[in-house]
Image: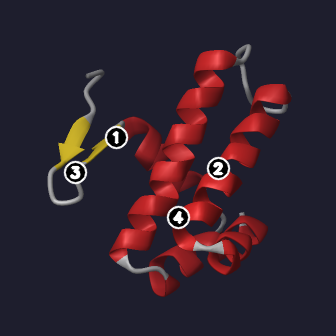
């Protein structure tokens, strides 16, 4: 749907454009942690959390979402999902670097 793809090895749906945008938006320090300290499953879970939070905010909040209440919800949801999926320590490290 919408040019997204299915990652059959992980059985997850991805919107490629959002995925690539999130990777490009990482700070250099965040990208270094992502590349060097996360295994493939953690990388998938971290970005899946970000994609889900992004889609939720874009669906339910006024656009543009950036620097508005939707942005706060997006980041809060991203942190909560990431914490539940990859743990508090890694999430804090990544989001502090973000």
- The numbered mark, 4 or 3, whose residue comes first in the sequence reads 3
Spatial CA distance of label 2 from label 1 is 18 Å
Spatial CA distance of label 4 from label 3 is 16 Å
Q: Is residue 74 left or right of residue 7?
A: right
Residue 77 is situated, as x and y percent measured from the top left of the image, at 68, 45
Identify the residue at image location x=68%, y=54%. 80
Spatial CA distance of label 1 from label 3 is 15 Å
Q: For the residue labelled by badge 2, is the local secondary structure a helix, a strand or a loop?
A: helix
- The numbered mark, 1 or 4, whose residue comes first in the sequence reads 1
Which of discs 2 and 1 lies nearer the camera? The answer is 2
Residue 46 is situated, as x and y percent measured from the top left of the image, at 51, 61
- The numbered mark, 3 or 2, whose residue comes first in the sequence reads 3
Q: Residues within 10 Å of mark 4 (few under 14, many from 20)?
A: some
Query: Is 25 located above or below residue 59 in the figure?
Result: below
Which of discs 2 and 4 lies nearer the camera? The answer is 4
Labelled pair 2, 1 in contact (Cβ < 8 Å): no
Name the residue that disc number 1 marks: 16
Query: Is 16 located above or below residue 45 in the figure?
Result: above
Query: Is 94 located above or below residue 5 in the figure?
Result: below
Identify the residue at image location x=56%, y=79%. 32
- The numbered mark, 2 or 1, whose residue comes first in the sequence reads 1
Name the residue that disc number 3 marks: 11
Which of discs 1 and 3 lies nearer the camera? The answer is 3
Which of discs 1 and 4 lies nearer the camera? The answer is 4
Give residue 85's mark: 4
Name the residue that disc number 2 marks: 78
Q: Residues within 10 Å of mark 3 (few under 14, many from 20)?
A: few
- The numbered mark, 1 or 3, whose residue comes first in the sequence reads 3
Q: Is residue 7 left or right of residue 91?
A: left
């Amino acid at each position: 749907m919408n040019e997204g793809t299915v990652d059959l090895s992980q059985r997850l749906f991805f919107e490629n454009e959002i995925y690539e945008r999130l990777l490009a938006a990482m700070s250099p320090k965040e990208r270094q942690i992502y590349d060097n300290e996360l295994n493939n499953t953690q990388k998938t879970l971290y970005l899946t959390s970000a994609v889900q939070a992004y889609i939720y905010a874009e669906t339910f909040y006024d656009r543009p979402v950036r620097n508005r209440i939707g942005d706060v919800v997006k980041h809060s949801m991203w942190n909560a999902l990431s914490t539940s999926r990859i743990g508090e320590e890694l999430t804090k490290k990544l989001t502090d670097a973000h």
